[in-house]
């Protein structure tokens, strides 16, 4: 018996809590930006943090809905083109709830099932979920660099409540 696949390290509820902790922290990073810099500041040709946040908005909730409904839809940021920090934070909260709703509807048995995310990325559902979390961490790291370059102390990375 393969001990890697037979031992459970984290359960479904723990995984959602972990993901939601990252969402909470990224929300605080968004909050830390002054409005002008959220939309206009970048370093080295990277996108402003507002664009990174809108990318994250267009992935998590829509992807979980697609997975649960077993309907692969093309990736689109169109519904998440926002122009104020207030709008981004409101949609962030909305999509965080959408993630929880659909995640809770996903049977654990489906985690190993392959799903063609956005019609482009056919991987097991659990790997797609890890991608959502990893992508958020990656972009939040960019936000930390921006905040530090602006002389703003970012939230502590371990404070996810």
Image (cartoon, rainbow, N blue to C red):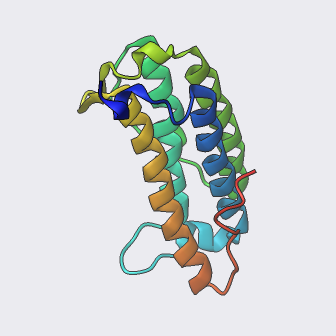
Residue visible at 56% across and 24% down in the picture:
103
Q: Quadrant of residue 7?
A: top left
Quadrant in the rendering for residue 112: top left
Quarter-of-image position of residue 115: top left
Relative depth, front residue between 50 and 128:
128
Q: Identify whether 119 is placed above or below 87.
A: above
Count of numbered circles in the view: 0
Residue 11 visible to the viewer = yes
Query: Residue 11, how many percent across, how many down?
Result: 57, 29
Q: Residue at x 67, y 69 (%)?
A: 33
Foreground residue among 37 and 138: 138
Query: Would you place residue 6 above or below residue 133 in this image?
Result: above
Q: In the rendered view, does 39 fall on the left or right side of 46?
A: right
> Is residue 120 toward the left or the right of residue 78 in the image?
left
Decide if residue 77 is in sight here.
no
Q: Position of residue 61 (x, y in %)?
A: 54, 32
Out of 134 and 29, give the one closest to the viewer: 134
Q: Position of residue 154 (x, y in %)?
A: 67, 73
Q: What residue is at 55 percent from the left and 60 percent from the top?
A: 50
**In what quadrant of the picture does the N terminus appear?**
top left
């Amino acid at each position: 018996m393969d001990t890697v696949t037979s031992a459970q390290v984290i359960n479904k509820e723990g995984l959602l809590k972990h993901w939601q902790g990252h969402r909470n922290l990224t929300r605080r990073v968004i909050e830390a930006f002054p409005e002008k810099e959220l939309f206009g500041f970048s370093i080295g040709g990277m996108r402003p943090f507002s664009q990174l946040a809108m990318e994250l908005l267009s992935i998590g909730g829509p992807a979980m809905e697609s997975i649960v409904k077993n309907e692969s839809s093309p990736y689109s940021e169109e519904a998440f083109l926002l122009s104020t920090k207030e709008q981004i934070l409101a949609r962030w909260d909305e999509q965080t709830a959408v993630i929880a709703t659909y995640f809770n509807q996903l049977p654990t048995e489906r985690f190993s099932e392959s799903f063609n995310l956005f019609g482009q990325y056919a991987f097991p559902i659990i790997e797609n979920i890890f991608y959502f979390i990893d992508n958020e961490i990656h972009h939040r790291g960019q936000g930390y660099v921006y905040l530090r370059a602006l002389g703003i102390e970012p939230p502590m990375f371990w404070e996810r409540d």
